[in-house]
Amino acid sequence: MHRSIAIFTQKILTNSNRITTTVTTILCSQSNTLNPRANGFALFRLLSFAPMQRRAPDPDDPSTLMKEDGVSVCSRMWIENFREPDRVANNLTSYLRRFELWVLAYQKVCTDEMGAYMPRSAIQRSALEDLLALRNAVLDDRFKWGARLQFFIKSPKDKTDYESLSKRKIKAILTTTQPAPFQDKIVQEVLLMILEPIYEARFSQKSFAFRPGRNAHTALRVIRRSFAGYLWYIKGDFSTLLDGMKVGLVISALMRDVRDKKVIDMVKAALTTPVITSSVEEPKKKKKRKYQKKRVLAEDEPKPDPYWLETFFGFAPEEAEKVPSWGHCGILSPLLANICLDELDRWMEGKVKEFYHPSKSDVIWNSPEGEAEQGNTSWPEFVPTSGPDKTRKMDYIRYGGHILIGVRGPRADAATLRKQLIEFVDQRYMLKLDNESLPIEHITKGIMFLDHVLCRRVVYPTLRYTATGGKIISEKGVGTLLSVTASLKQSIKQFRKLNFIKGDRDPDPQPCFRMFHATQAHTNAQMNKFLSTIVEWYRYADNRKKVVNFCSYIIRGSLAKLYAAKYKLRSRAKVYKIGSRNLSRPLKEKKGSSPEYHNLLRMGLVESVDGLQYTRMSLVPETDYTPFPSNWRPNHEKALFEYIRLDDTKTLEEQRCCIREQGLVSPQDYISMLVWNYKRNAIVIDRTSHSSGNYTEKDKQLLLSNKHENDDQKSKEGEEHEDGFYAVQL
């Protein structure tokens, strides 16, 4: 029996190649039939100490490919591109190979899909292997945009077994409009992380849409800061370019700064691969509506946008409504649109410098290199009016596909610029424009941009100055102020689009029946958030109090009508009487049906009702007139430039020289002094031993060598004393 066990063990070990056959034969020959335990221990010892063949680490193992954090890789890319903004990007495939970027992209896409952030430790091993397969497919040109049935990686939410689908379901998937595949979103995120730092270091400071750290508020503050004093305005709408451009124009614009074939081919394939959309279906017959239960969201399913946020999205200005979506580019489309329109920005910057003609009589506008350093020329600063002896100047700003040009000079110059702009857009973007699409308007008519009206307010300030002889003279001057006011007409239009107002002329609130089944506390909370976003949106409007008070009136009236219909109170006046002006009192408690509301509230048996905000104009905050710097940059760009400046060797040397001139000690010099003191004090010599000469010849030579080494530094780090020691000045 024991011999058969040994033979079976020999077969196993022979097949596994762990020990040789001779060792097994020795084990069989030395087996003791009388002591089976000894044979078992011998077998156990042999298996325990058998030499194992260690496998080399797999280079395609996901755990070995993640050498550092993906955020640090992205930070290094931003620093390198902002350090050398004009460098042509040749080798971007090396970044495509970085598995850390793919893991970071997977986390971002999962956050959008699941509605919660997924840490790296929560990513399963199978997902990492699928993600690695997707990366290898992209590098080997095996990845196809818009794949419907063949996936390298699937969403954690997608539990569909595509191999067992019926022909009818497969045909429906292949012929109807479907959301972008999960793997396409990951590839788009990786391309965005690689290309965005390259172009953010190159983009013009005149564009403010689809860029990190810049928004509509930034554009309004730049207009308030830099467009004061302009008389003629050219407003252009190039938003048709955001619907789609020719592939050749996009690729040529991309290849100005990127020469990596892999990245260029991927973007080109995303633009040229057709997007499958549903054909026009026949109208279905109306079925009788049945009662449907309220759908309960799954644990990993993201919650839909709340009502206040959906409402505010509909309240957005028309300049911000259109977001480009080209082919299978997805979130890469806004960046590509800015890349294409950046040439327009550069051309306009050249025209701004070319148009600038200073005048000696206009000192406030006269500055070197065309830069206006007149301080904050917006409200409430005084800006001189235009005239033939004034400085000719022009400025430009772009938000998405909408441009705004301000001209200070004769109208003929604005007409010449418009003609040149039409020719440039026709040649570069093949977009046919005419004079009606680029109107020239005077500041007195009011220019609408981002739902704000730019207008001029003529003021007559009293100018006091001291004449010869010390006499103070007071005169009435004439000046203009740039006013950036919110458009009340546009606000009414947006409310009417959201079904908060009915009627054509007088705005009459309409009940928002979508909140009919919500509680009073929840409805008031939703509308308070909506009002807070409106207050923030009109933060830089001169008439902020007036327009927010009007919005509060519309929302309060809409809620009053809703509560009147819900609680059968017949009129808004009765709702205000019971619920107070801000609708903070509960409306459904009746006398004698329950205890006092405050007692229930104190016991925690009822939900507290918050009243509506900004029910009076005095509660609306004032307009923000914080001065805006001329060379403004977002915070992340400031941090990048500061890091690059401090990392420069010239800056470090300048800091060391400044520290030495002030008699201070830098950390590096302090460390060198500590090392020097340590060497000097390696042998302890007191004054008595020094005077009596009680030290060996070896100590003499060591002390003498240390003294010679530090003779060159004694002028910087200390003074020589009579006994040969140095005193460090800290």
Image (cartoon, helix red, strand yellow):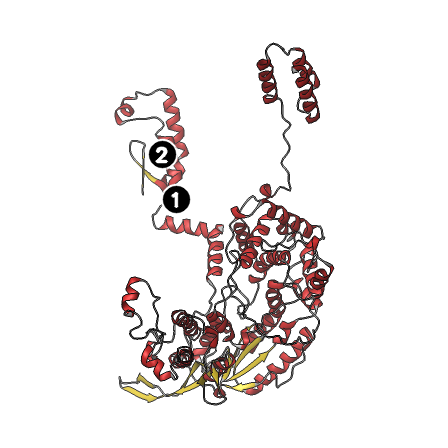
Name, please, the residue furthest toward the front. 593
| 170 displayed left or right of 218 | right
Q: Quadrant of the C terminus?
A: top left
| 666 displayed left or right of 274 | left
Vertical position of residue 588 compared to residue 23: above or below: below
Task: Look at mark 1 in the image and give the residue it sits on.
Answer: 667
Residue 130 picture location, percent across and down: 63, 48
Amino acid type at circle 1 is Pro
Q: Which mark is residue 677?
A: 2
CA separation in Å, label 2 and label 1:
15 Å
| 683 displayed left or right of 361 | left
Image point (40%, 29%), residue name: 705
Vertical position of residue 716 compared to residue 300: above or below: above
Q: Secondary structure at mark 2?
A: helix
Vertical position of residue 677 compared to residue 153: above or below: above
Amino acid type at circle 2 is Asn
